[in-house]
């Protein structure tokens, strides 16, 4: 057995209602005059002070619905808090640490002593599993102790931590490379930039490799020949086959909806398909119900959890993601020259990725056509 400290970042003060102290709050007090009580609810946890500030603390509001110009807590403050200290309506006041002894394939259950009060004075709230062992995996949830309400479990953590190709590591590398990230208020901002670049990488791969990132789905169509693709990762159709009996499939040719006449006849063994809207396709000939078997280009899976990883084909190009995030951060900070520098670096990495993802059958010797004939007396 070994000891394993499991950290969870204190992020509850992000994207929640907040206000400011209108006068000083004192240690030992239970009443906090504020500028606005909107968004605060009875028995919710509140965080007084910004995360990672030494005097930040968690308190619980009373059972009465907040009203007037002050918030009243059931416990007393440990520290003095100056006027204009922010107060966040975080709702949850504890973290429940859970463990699976059979890795990420197992079920995470709450550990003895693993329900811990959030420590906003630090960047992380942690728990020390003194009986940890190789192969164990962990999850956490937030818990509102008075309301007895718990969030869904987080993604898995392992003894090895997050992989180099994970959202957490890419975000961490970007933020650490910034000289000042004080204007980046939330991790979600960096996550959005990572996913923006993921879209561009995916589109680049599809443009040069028509067999990249494909999915398959069957959709039904009525006698009018219309069917709707409902796959959530659908981007664009690559190929279509039609069947009316479930056994015989016929390859369909793409056409434009304006390229046929109302009385034009089509062959059922050589069907055509056309777009009608973003995800609705039509079939010619129509008149029979049937099924369209579609191969389509897929949108990339969004990276949302810390442990979510880039597609394997992009593992060698994590620098492009980091550089793109740095570029956007510097543009946001009005440091245009630095933004241009890192954007150019990310585009350079994108070019390398494009060359690597291009099928080898599309590369090779380049030939030059001679325009002028060379006679026997010419010298070179």
Image: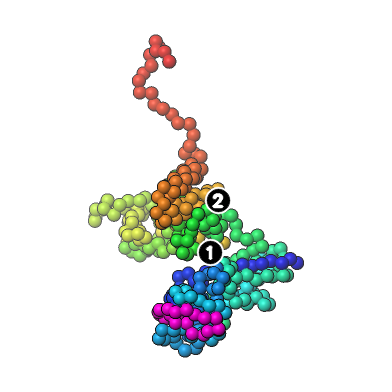
Q: Residues within 10 Å of mark 2 (few under 14, many from 20)?
A: few
Quarter of the rendering containing residue 4: bottom right
The residue depicted at 26 percent of the width and 53 percent of the height is 258
Residue name at image x 33 percent, y 55 percent = 274
Q: Position of residue 230 (x, y in %)?
A: 41, 64
Residue 184, horizontal then vertical, whole percent: 46, 61
Residue to which mark 1 is pinned: 305
> How far across and down, in percent of the image, does residue 136 sit?
68, 66
Between 168 and 105, the one lying in front of the other is 168
Spot occupied by residue 255 in the image (x, y as percentages of width and height)? 32, 51
Q: Around disc 1, counting alpha carbons within 10 Å, would you say few (fewer than 14), some (14 to 19), or many (20 or more)?
A: some
Colour style of the rendered protein structure: rainbow
Looking at the rendered structure, the secondary structure element under dot 1 is: loop
Tell me which label, 2 or 1, sits earlier in the chain. Answer: 1
**Residue 28 sits inside the magenta stretch:** yes
Residue 274 visible from this viewpoint? yes
Q: CA distance from mark 2 to mark 1?
A: 17 Å
Q: Is residue 106 visible?
A: no
Label of residue 199 in the image = none
Query: 195 or 70, which lies in front?
Result: 70
Looking at the rendered structure, the secondary structure element under dot 2 is helix
Q: Quadrant of the N terminus?
A: bottom right
Question: Which residue is identified by label 2?
Answer: 315
Is residue 158 left or right of 281 when viewed as pictured?
right
Across the whole image, how many numbered discs are drawn on residues? 2
Q: Which residues are magenta?
A: 22-40
């Amino acid at each position: 057995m070994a000891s394993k400290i499991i950290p969870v970042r204190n992020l509850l003060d992000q994207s929640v209602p907040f206000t400011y102290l209108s006068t000083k709050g004192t240690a030992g007090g239970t009443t906090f005059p504020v500028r606005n009580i909107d968004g605060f609810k009875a028995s919710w946890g509140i965080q007084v002070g910004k995360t990672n500030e030494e005097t930040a603390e968690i308190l619980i509001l009373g059972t009465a619905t907040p009203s007037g110009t002050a918030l009243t807590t059931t416990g007393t403050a440990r520290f003095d808090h100056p006027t204009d200290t922010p107060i966040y309506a975080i709702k949850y006041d504890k973290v429940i640490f859970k463990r699976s002894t059979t890795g990420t394939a197992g079920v995470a259950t709450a550990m003895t002593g693993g329900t811990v009060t959030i420590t906003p004075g630090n960047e992380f709230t942690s728990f020390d599993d003194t009986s940890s062992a190789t192969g164990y995996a962990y999850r956490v949830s937030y818990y509102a102790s008075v309301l007895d309400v718990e969030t869904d479990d987080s993604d898995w953590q392992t003894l090895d931590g997050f992989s180099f190709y994970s959202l957490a590591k890419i975000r961490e590398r970007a933020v650490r490379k910034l000289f000042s990230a004080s204007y980046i208020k939330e991790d979600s901002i960096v996550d959005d930039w990572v996913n923006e670049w993921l879209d561009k990488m995916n589109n680049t791969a599809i443009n040069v490799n028509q067999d990249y990132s494909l999915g398959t789905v069957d959709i039904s169509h009525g006698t009018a020949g219309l069917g709707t693709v409902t796959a959530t990762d659908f981007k664009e159709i690559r190929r279509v086959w039609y069947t009316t009996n479930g056994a015989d499939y016929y390859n369909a040719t793409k056409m434009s909806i304006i390229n046929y006449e109302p009385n034009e006849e089509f062959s059922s063994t050589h069907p055509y398909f056309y777009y009608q809207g973003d995800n609705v396709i039509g079939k010619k000939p129509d008149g029979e119900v049937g099924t369209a078997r579609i191969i389509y280009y897929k949108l990339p899976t969004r990276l949302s959890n810390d442990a979510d990883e880039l597609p394997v084909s992009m593992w060698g190009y994590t620098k492009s993601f980091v550089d793109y995030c740095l570029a956007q951060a510097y543009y946001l900070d009005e440091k245009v020259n630095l933004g241009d520098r890192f954007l150019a670096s990310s585009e350079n990495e994108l070019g390398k990725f494009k060359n690597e993802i291009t099928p080898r059958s599309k590369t090779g010797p380049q030939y030059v056509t001679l325009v002028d004939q060379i006679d026997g007396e010419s010298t070179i």
